[in-house]
């Protein structure tokens, strides 16, 4: 179903042994890749070779290194590999921010080329290992999701409330904590602190609360104002969102059906849903535009497409506002009805904040540039 779209976008199919019974012949694919690069263009490749939802990079396949060395050895163009890392701030959220981070170029110079001509297999392995290390520097990697969950909780506790971090600063702070945690993971004090952090997060989850809600006491007036504002936003968006919701619901249903029917892997299902939506939405708009253009006129057809686009955006915003309103109402209810539990959690939080910051002060290298000053911590 997606083959025509992928072909039109310039994608080159490469097959693995898992996908084809018998011998895998990718000579045509590699020839096409050589042609792309030697014509002065660039190519993107995901060297892991799979789509996954693990907490760290998978072992890289050798294809990227093999192509780079083979093209460089032909001597027609100079080859550089640019490591590129995708880091999601909140990967479980719809429309989450994503940081695309680029590393230092890996230049395939004479040393690499001579090594490849002398021992192809060993040079490919070495370049793959080098690329793996370069990608690790531009991505956030943890040995498991438990570790990453601890790190994210620690980061929230450590960060001053007044500090506004960019996506790159969020990832860098997480990365520093991962490195420090893994370096001292066998120390008793680190293990004890980790258990305390896990217990704090588990208690938050049990009560349905978020860490930021404990930073400062929530007054009923402020909470009511937030609920009212989100309610008014929903009322304002509703007239704009209804047409878009009615027209786009069938597209959503078809995309969901395609995703569930053609794959059982969670990440593949999400990808199929997105790609199906990207294909179906323009088709829907085209059909509506043709219908309006024939019956009313071409300018009205253009206006219909613009109106549908705005209506789609409004429907998405409406769903987000609705989710935020529900969360606000539940949070107010919990914070007002769980008084003693919330007070106890706030005391636990304050204790953990002190321990984490003390631990950071002890462990951080004197030459490491701090992300926050003492003034930042003092403004809380």
Image (spheres, rainbow, N blue to C red):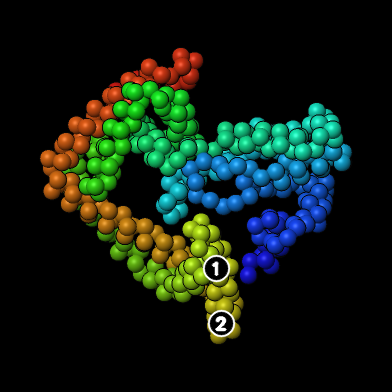
Q: In the rendered image, which residue does mark 1 sit on?
A: 262
Q: In the rendered image, which residue does mark 2 sit on?
A: 291
Q: Is residue 136 above or below residue 319?
A: above
Provide residue 322's location: percent of width, then percent of height. Answer: 31, 60
**Residue positioned 54% across, 74% down in the render:** 284
**Real-space CA distance between mark 1 and mark 2, rounded to the nearest whole angstrom:** 32 Å
Provide residue 348's location: percent of width, then percent of height. Answer: 22, 32
Provide residue 280's location: percent of width, then percent of height. Answer: 56, 70
Earlier residue among tags 1 and 2: 1
Q: Is residue 12 left or right of residue 316?
A: right
Q: Quadrant of residue 213?
A: top left
Provide residue 285's location: percent of width, then percent of height. Answer: 55, 73
Q: Are marks 1 and 2 in contact (CB under 8 Å)?
A: no
Toward the viewer: 50 or 176?
Answer: 50
Q: Nearer the viewer, mark 1 or mark 2?
A: 1
**Residue positioned 39% across, 67% down in the render:** 241
Residue that extends furthest to the top in the rendered view of this protein: 366
Q: Is residue 290 above or below residue 78?
A: below
Labelled disc at residue 339: none
Res. 161 in view: no
Toward the viewer: 104 or 304?
Answer: 104
Q: Residues within 10 Å of mark 1 (few under 14, many from 20)?
A: few
Label 1 residue SS: helix
Q: Is residue 188 left or right of residue 289?
A: left
Label 2 residue SS: helix
Q: Residues within 10 Å of mark 2 (few under 14, many from 20)?
A: some
């Amino acid at each position: 179903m997606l083959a025509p779209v992928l072909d039109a976008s310039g994608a080159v199919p490469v097959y693995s042994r898992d996908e084809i019974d018998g011998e895998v012949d990718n000579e045509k694919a590699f020839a096409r890749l050589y042609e792309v690069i030697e014509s002065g263009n660039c190519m993107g490749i995901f060297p892991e070779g799979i789509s996954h939802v693990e907490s760290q990079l998978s072992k890289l396949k050798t294809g990227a290194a093999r192509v780079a060395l083979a093209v460089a050895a032909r001597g027609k163009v100079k080859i550089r590999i640019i490591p590129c890392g995708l880091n999601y701030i909140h990967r479980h959220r719809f429309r989450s921010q994503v940081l695309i981070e680029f590393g230092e170029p890996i230049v395939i110079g004479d040393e690499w080329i001579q090594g490849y001509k002398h021992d192809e297999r060993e040079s490919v392995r070495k370049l793959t290992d080098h690329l793996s290390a370069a990608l690790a520097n531009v991505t956030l990697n943890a040995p498991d999701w438990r570790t990453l969950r601890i790190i994210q909780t620690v980061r929230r506790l450590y960060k001053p409330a007044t500090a506004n971090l960019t996506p790159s600063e969020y990832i860098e702070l997480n990365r520093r904590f991962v490195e420090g945690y893994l370096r001292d993971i066998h120390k008793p004090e680190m293990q004890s602190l980790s258990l305390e952090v896990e217990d704090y997060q588990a208690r938050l989850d049990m009560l349905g609360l978020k860490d930021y809600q404990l930073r400062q006491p929530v007054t009923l007036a402020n909470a009511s104002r937030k609920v009212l504002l989100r309610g008014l936003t929903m009322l304002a968006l509703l007239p704009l969102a209804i047409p878009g919701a009615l027209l786009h619901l069938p597209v959503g249903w078809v995309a969901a059906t395609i995703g569930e029917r053609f794959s059982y892997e969670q990440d593949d299902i999400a990808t199929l849903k997105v790609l199906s939506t990207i294909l179906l939405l323009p088709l829907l708009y085209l059909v509506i535009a043709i219908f309006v253009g024939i019956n009313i006129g071409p300018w009205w057809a253009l206006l219909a497409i613009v109106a549908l686009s705005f209506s789609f955006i409004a429907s998405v915003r409406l769903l987000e506002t609705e989710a935020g309103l529900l969360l606000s109402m539940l949070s107010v209810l919990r914070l007002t009805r769980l008084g003693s539990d919330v007070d106890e959690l706030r005391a636990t939080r304050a204790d953990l904040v002190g321990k984490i910051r003390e631990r950071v002060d002890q462990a951080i290298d004197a030459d490491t540039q701090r992300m926050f000053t003492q003034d930042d911590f003092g403004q809380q």
